[in-house]
Amino acid sequence: MRVEKPFSQSCENNRGPILSELVRVFARSRKVLEIGSGTGQHAVFMAPRLPHLSWQTSDLADNHPGINRWIDEYPSSNLLRPLTLDVCRQPPPWLEADAVFSANTCHILSWQNVENLFRVIDRLLSESGTLVIYGPFNYHGRYTSPSNEKFDAWLKQQAPHQGIRDFEKVNALAVAADFRLVEDNPMPSQNRLLVWQR
């Protein structure tokens, strides 16, 4: 049975600006774990343009067929097929990476699972590494634009546990896991690309 290839227009729109930052941010990294690869569009775009990296996709098992469809169509020697990764569980002990990338996940996950996400990252990048999270954030409890306020209302209509997170609360999770914020980059469409180092 042929799986329909998923598509996200927002991935197409933001992949270029994200790549422009990752070229610099991941310059010294060697293996990146993408948590929440979603459709797979980011992975197939980023991996061949960051040839020094091994790009490991991951997501819940339900999303693997779609990710694999994209990888089948746009293969790259440094792009790895998805692992099953659930933030409610610890990553397998053999999984290694020196960087983590996650896009548009914090506002989809429940707050409890955002906390779980950082526990997984804490375990994975136990000694050192770079953490990059992309998406919309509130600052000082306020929306950064009317469009983000509308987007937050739409998210909550889809599922009550969803919503744009406060930067300060997310950063507190990172600090508690011994990460230090080194960059807060403004991105198109009122998004941010946050970079932490350990």
Image (spheres, rainbow, N blue to C red):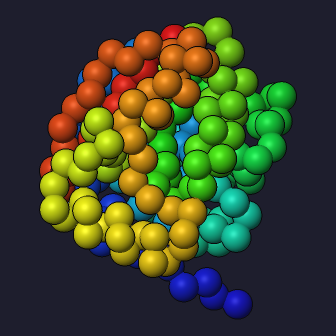
- Tell me which corner region of the image, top left, top right, bottom left or bottom right, holds residue 74: bottom left
Quadrant where the N terminus is found in the figure: bottom right
Residue 148 visible at all: yes
Give the left or right position of residue 132, taking residue 192 as reference.
right
Q: Nearer the viewer, residue 51 or 107?
A: 107
Residue depicted at x 16% and y 55%? 145
Location of residue 56 in the rendering, given as x and y in whole percent from the top left corner = 59, 42
Give the left or right position of residue 27, taking residue 184 as reference.
right
Residue depicted at x 26% and y 46%? 142
Residue 26 visible at all: no
Location of residue 158 in the rendering, given as x and y in whole percent from the top left corner = 49, 77
- Tell me which corner region of the image, top left, top right, bottom left or bottom right, holds residue 35: top right
**In the image, is residue 4 above or below residue 144?**
below
Q: Nearer the viewer, residue 70 or 21?
A: 21
Residue depicted at x 77% and y 37%? 91
**In the image, is residue 89 above or below residue 37?**
above
Give the left or right position of residue 21, taking residue 164 as reference.
left
